[in-house]
Image (cartoon, grey):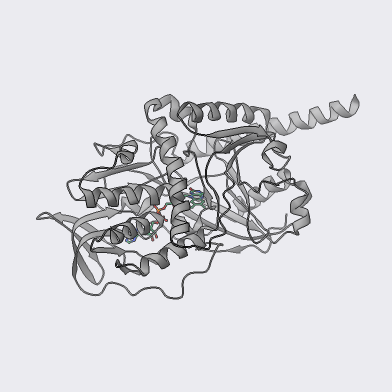
Amino acid sequence: MDVDNVEYSTFTGWIDPPTDVRPALDGDLTCDVAVIGGGMGGMATALRLAERGQDVVLLEEKFCGYGASSRSAGQIAGAPGGDLRLLSLFSPKKMPGMVRIAENSARFVEELIETHDIDCDYEANGMVFGAVSFGQMLRVRTQAWIIRRAGGHGKLGTSAELGIPGAFVGGMREGVGGMLNPGKLCRGVRRALLSSSARVFEQTKVTDVRRTGGKAVLATPHGEVRANKVVLATNAYAGEWDITPERLSVPMWIIEAETAPIAPERIAALGWSSRSGVVTQHNIMTNYRLTARNTIVFGVRRLERGQSFPLPEKTADPGLVAELAEAFATTFPSLADVAVERAWGGWIAITSSWLSIAGQIGDNVYYSLACNGHGLAQAPYIGSLIADLIVDGTRPEALDDVWVEKPKFPPFMMMSPLGLRTVWAVDRFNDLFNGSRRRGLRSAARVR
Ligand SMILES: Cc1cc2nc3c(=O)[nH]c(=O)nc-3n(C[C@H](O)[C@H](O)[C@H](O)COP(=O)(O)OP(=O)(O)OC[C@H]3O[C@@H](n4cnc5c(N)ncnc54)[C@H](O)[C@@H]3O)c2cc1C
């Protein structure tokens, strides 16, 4: 694949930044609830609060949709993120809740799209856990069993049965969800938010959060906000204040790349009739998905740990783009001549337990973050539940599944640069082994 003319963006490849960025907060104000962060999580929280009659202010450092939400692969996942075998081993009691949250989150986003008439190219075709080898297929079968045992849905099949490219041995289609253009989704939710009663200040970085005299005081460069309640929806950026619990999450940088447009007949020849997005079953997955503009978006394969706050603005590493392109060409040899047109990346938040979490600090600060790379649907759903908790004064039952009673978090395993490099190396070793085994089987078949 040609990777010589890739456009490297510090935002996303899905859309351009908005042309109507709202002015920064200039002066002091008071409100019932302040939401910090204008990703899908913060916007959905503020929108729900406004719809329920609350006096809500949203503060966003850049513009709503600036963070991971617009940069994601756009897969509305209907199953939890992470290795479900490990999750069910270490947190077996949590599994039914995690599966429930994942499926309900996908339904929540579908409803959000419909209610606000958001044009975001949504295709409800369910994401597929795709196996690139028989070893990975075994893993898929185990994960499907875990999901079903936890009350979830998933359909196992060969690549032909699932309508995914023949490069995959087979896989499992999630029972709910699909794929969309996340940039357009964020833009649509931002439009709904700006038309609501919520007061939205973009270009406004919250530099400190203090609790004093029953109120929370948020400092920004040109004014203070005094709120009765605060929701931290800053995702990977959450570790910036003293108030944040220690080791709440670790920021990780991940990337996506997009091909140049591909002729529809060449896409049809891949046998991708379902158009479902596919994620491989490596320890660190690679995702592949078709877009409405006849391109393929693909990414991840490597995690890079953020070292300190504030998190830097970055572009994708050209070395990793080349590595992803090589894997793409191996997966889709008929498209090896297609160029990579653009690449971008974003910060996600990972928790030590690999579980999505929400909780409370004191009696008036709430947090919801770290859906471990699966937050495009989960962050807004959990945010809307927190909004209900604030308005009703009682915790919705659905929040119990992610609620952390005591905000104490253990140290991270395998999240050091060396640990991440080792996990990457294990994946590459397995690829090599599976590649040579496949080549061996093919030549044995030829000899016979
Ligand atoms: C490359 C990539 C691919 C992904 N693919 C998928 C996918 O296919 N499916 C899926 O479900 N998930 C995916 N994810 C994860 C998903 O995007 C996130 O989990 C989700 O968008 C998190 O939403 P959020 O609102 O919590 O955070 P974000 O969207 O990151 O929003 C946080 C916001 O807070 C703002 N902020 C931070 N600090 C401050 C401050 N001090 N003051 C004011 N504002 C502040 C930021 O500017 C940002 O806009 C992907 C992520 C990336 C990066």
Q: Quadrant of ligand 1?
A: bottom left
Quarter in which the N terminus is drawn:
bottom right
Where residue 162 appears, as percent x and y from the top left, is 67, 39
Task: Establish if 53 lies above or below 111.
Answer: below
User: In the shown orientation, is residue 408 left or right of residue 284?
Assistant: left
Q: Quadrant of residue 356?
A: top left
Q: Residue at x 53, y 63 (%)?
A: 119
Q: Quadrant of residue 50?
A: bottom left
Quarter in which the C terminus is drawn:
top right
User: In the shown orientation, is residue 307 left or right of residue 430?
Assistant: left
Please count the marks in the image.
Answer: 0
Where residue 25 appears, as percent x and y from the top left, is 27, 72
Where residue 9 appears, as percent x and y from the top left, is 54, 64
- The furthest residue to the right: 447
Q: Let me know if residue 377 appears in the view.
A: yes
Task: Establish if 197 lies above or below 208.
Answer: below
Q: Residue at x 40, y 26 (%)?
A: 92
- The furthest residue to the left: 213
User: In the shown orientation, is residue 443 left or right of residue 130?
Assistant: right
Where residue 434 appears, as percent x and y from the top left, is 70, 31
Of residues 180 and 25, which is closer to you in this image?
180
Of residues 408 and 147, which is closer to you in this image?
147
Of residues 77 and 60, which is closer to you in this image?
77
Q: Let me know if residue 354 appears in the view.
A: no
- The furthest residue to the front: 115
Task: Establish if 358 lies above or below 210.
Answer: above
